[in-house]
Amino acid sequence: MNITKVVIPVAGWGTRSLPATKNIPKEMLPVYKKPAVQYVVEEAMQAGLTDVVFVNNQNKRSLEDHFDRNLSLELVLKRAGKKDLLEEVLRVSNMVNIISVRQKEQLGLGHAVACAQEVVKNEHFAVLVGDDLIFSAEPAIAQLVEVAKTEQMPVVGVMEVPKEKVSNYGIIGGEEISPGLFRVKKLHEKPRPEEAPSRLAVVGRYVLPPDIFSYLEKVQPDSQGEYQLTDALHFLARENRLLAVKVSGRRFDIGDWVDYLTANIYFGLKDEELKQELTKSLKELLACSS
Ligand code: UTP
C-alpha cells in the first residue's frame, strides 16, 4: 500500500468561531505564530505524505495563498536584511504543492472528502481534518499510516473522551486486537452517553481506501442535511474492513474556544524566550479572575 496523498477539508463555514471567522477562515486563525492549518500540513509532511489536496470554497483562498510565494513581501524582507524571516516565509511557500478542489456547497465532511475523488483516483489516501491539531513525538497520521501498511486495512484515529462529551463525536464499538488497536464493528455518530458503545471518539485522522467514494455515494444526509464521513465508514466496519488506532498526542479542536485558547498558550509556553514572561502574566491573570 503506497500512500502519498492527503486530503485536507477546509471548506466549512466555521460558525462556532464567529464572528472571528466572518472573513478569516477558521483554519487560518493563528495558533501562536502560525495559522492552524500549517500545523496540519506540517504533520502530513513529517509523516512522509507528499501531495496535499485542499477541499476548499471560493471564500477561503487566503488558505492556499499562505502556501504560495509572496514576492512583494520577500522583496521587503530581503531589502530590510531580515534573513531569518525571509527564510521562514520561503520555507512555508515551498512546503507543499498546492492542489485544490472546490466543495461548492457545504454539505458535510463526507461530502467534502467525496469532492477529492478525481484527484485521489484509485489510491489509498490520508485525510486530516483542517481544524483538528494533534501533537505528539510521532505524528498522529504516521501512527495510522504505519498500521494501515502493516495490516493492509483502512484505519481511523480515535481518542478517549469524557462520557459527557461522546455526543459531540463519532464513537466506535469494537474489539481490542492488540494494545491500542481495535477492529471496528460499529460506529455511532453523536450518540447519547447512555447509548455510546465506548468512549473512543473518532478524531480527524483517517487512512481510507479508494472504494470509500462508492460508499460515500450511498450515504444519506443527516437531520442537518449533511453527509457524514462516519456513515461511509460504517459500511467498511460492517464488512470487517476497518481498524481504529488509539492515537497518542495532545489534541486541540480549533473550533472550540477553550481548545483554541489553550493551544495558543501551549505553544507560547514551549517558546523558551516567552515562557517566563507568559507564565508570570498567566499567574497574574488567574489571581485576578479567581
Ligand atoms: P467542522 O464541522 O468542525 O467545521 O468540520 P465547520 O462546519 O466549518 O464548523 P462549524 O461547526 O460551523 O463551526 C471539520 C473540518 O471539515 C471542514 C471544515 O472546514 C473543518 O476544517 N468541512 C466541514 C468542510 O470542508 N466541508 C463541510 O461541508 C464541512
Image (cartoon, rainbow, N blue to C red):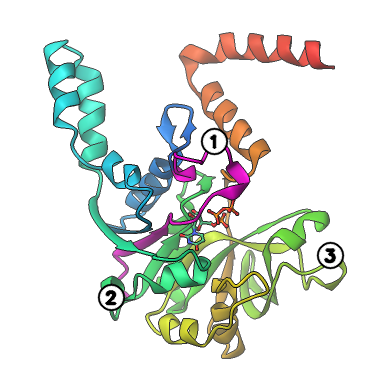
Start-end of magenta stretch: 1-27
Pointer 2 residue: 118
Looking at the image, tell me whether mark 3 or mark 1 is earlier in sequence order: 1
Pointer 1 residue: 20
Characterize the magenta stretch by its predominant secondary structure.
loop
Report the amino acid beneath label 3: Pro
Q: Position of residue 269 (x, y in %)?
A: 56, 22
102 vs 194, nearest the viewer? 102
Task: Say left or right for 57 vs 155.
Answer: left
Task: Say left or right for 62 vs 27.
Answer: left
Looking at the image, tell me whether mark 2 or mark 3 is earlier in sequence order: 2
Q: Is residue 175 magenta?
A: no
In the image, residue 240 sits, relative to residue 194, either above or below, namely: below
Report the amino acid beneath label 2: Glu
Looking at the image, tell me whether mark 1 or mark 2 is earlier in sequence order: 1
Q: Position of residue 131 (x, y in %)?
A: 51, 49
In the image, residue 198 sits, relative to residue 215, either above or below, namely: above
Q: Which mark is residue 151?
A: none
From the image, which quarter does the N terminus lie in? Answer: bottom left
Report the amino acid beneath label 1: Ala
In the image, residue 138 sits, relative to residue 214, either above or below, namely: above
Q: Residue at x 67, y 15 (%)?
A: 282
Q: Residue at x 53, y 59 (%)?
A: 204
Q: Residue at x 30, y 73 (%)?
A: 120
Alpha carbons under labels 3 and 1: distance apart = 31 Å
Q: Quadrant of residue 161?
A: bottom right
Q: Is residue 19 magenta?
A: yes
Tell me the SS state at disc 1. loop
Task: Say left or right for 31 vs 238.
Answer: left
Pointer 3 residue: 193
Q: Position of residue 37 (x, y in %)?
A: 42, 44
